Image (cartoon, helix red, strand yellow):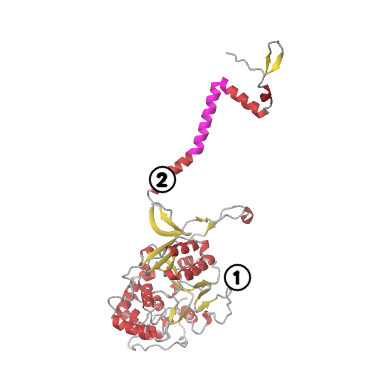
Amino acid sequence: MRHRSRSRFHRSPSGVRRESPNSARIGQLDQCGRARLRLHAAMLSNPRLRYGLILGAGFLSLVFLLPALVHRVLSLGFSSRIKASETWYRGQKLEHFAWQPPRDERLVITGKKLPSPEDLGTTTLTTQPIRVNRAAFVVLARNNDLYELLESVREMEDRFNHKYGYPWIFLNNEPFTEEFKERTSQFTSGECSYGLIDPSEWPTGNSMPENINVTLATERISAMGQKPIPYGGSITYRKMCRYQSMFFWRHPLLDDIKWYWRVEPSVKYYCDLDFDPFRFMKENKKKYGFVLSLYEYPDTIATLWETTKAFLIKHPEHLAQPNLIPFISYDNGLNYNQCHFWSNFEIGDLSLWRSQAYLDYVEFLDNAGGFFYERWGDAPVHSIAASLFLHPDELHFFDNIGYFHAPFHVCPVGGPTRNCACNEKEPLNFEFHAYSCTPHFKRVQSTVFRPAPPLPAPKAPETTDAPANVIIVTETRTTD
């Protein structure tokens, strides 16, 4: 059937053609409007066109809405598998999904704003360097250490970790406050985990381990507190030293950790780190790294070496050959020279502390009670153990890391090339200080594998005489 088009004119009763009443409105339509009217008229006259347009609109709606619908369904499915944890990131408490990608040894895309194409030339993709697997910063801190610790975390992040995003593990003998968790996680580029120390490893209040004579220990602690010895009268400090010597690596948060970097409140890192110390330790098969070494207060370790020699008589199989006894003794093992690595900075392989030799050693020391009857520090304990149980080449002095922990600091030679905020020629640069054991360490480590004349003995603080009937013999090997 042929449809008749409507005319914009109609005839009056007198037969004169006059313009329709709607003609003025139609005449005002622009070209696009007239096209829409023609399309509308065509749809009314052609059912196939009308149905085609309706189906096309429905298809486009499905294309755009389907991805959003799928995403919503999947997100609802995953939400039921969320497992709460004590992990924080950038001030927000995170929750872990049942599935996670491998934590480390992978390419990590930064969450920061990408640089402009002009900055990169051909690409706008930025990546973080690949991290060492199972490596983390380990911090033992109290809630009231927060702001001093934030300074240390900021130093570490600015100088090194912002490029890698290594995780942080915080340990405390009391529950961390929400403020502590929120603030520290805001300063870090990696995940933060917070752990509570077991009371069996850190006795509460003024209590001490069961094998300690509390009356005798209290008397000796009080007497040492009258002397000019740091923390001489502190019970808490002794518990901390015992924990760092015997337990920190046993905390469940460190079960999956192999490499650790110890960080303490109020420390500074003077230079940009243009390398990864974790990777250096791993690739060069190092197990213990330090930046400062010095002499210990003799009164705090009066019987430590005597106890150590008794242990070696009982367990001679644990003594490494060769070893670094010449570093900790000027007389071939008869007496301890009090040299130790300052343990507030440590980068190490936890396999050292998990070894049977070290476990037997610290258990022997703990049974002797010197952590409380005297003030055995974790620094001399770690240093003696590393010198006895490691091959000399497994220890490393980081001469390219600038570091400060009151009252000493080290500034690397050639620091300006790495934006070092310290003066390498300053007299207080501890590497060259008379009280530093580092020059002695470097001499010993460089000569331990070849015959050499006896090393000159630097002047050391007075030490308690040890029994003369026990002499530890070291082995000297010749290399080509």
**Residue for point 51% across, 35% down:** 61
Closer to us: mark 2 or mark 1? 2
Q: Earlier in the sequence, mark 2 or mark 1?
A: 2
Which residue type carries mark 1? Thr
The relative height of residue 128 versus residue 367 in the rendered view (above or below) is: above
> Quick check: is 58 in the magenta stretch?
yes
- Image position of 188 (left or right of 216): right
- Image position of 415 (left or right of 438): right
For the residues labelled 2 and 1, say whether their Cβ atoms are less than 8 Å apart: no
Q: Secondary structure at mark 1?
A: helix
Residue at the farthest top position: 14
Residue of label 2:
76
> Quick check: is 27 in the magenta stretch?
no
Whole-percent x and y of residue 462? 42, 89
**Residue for point 55% across, 68% down:** 272
Q: Specify start and end residues of the magenta stretch as a single range.
A: 43-65
Question: Which disc is residue 386 wearing?
Answer: none
Residue of label 1:
417
Whole-percent x and y of residue 227? 41, 86
Give the dominant element type of the magenta stretch: helix, strand or loop: helix
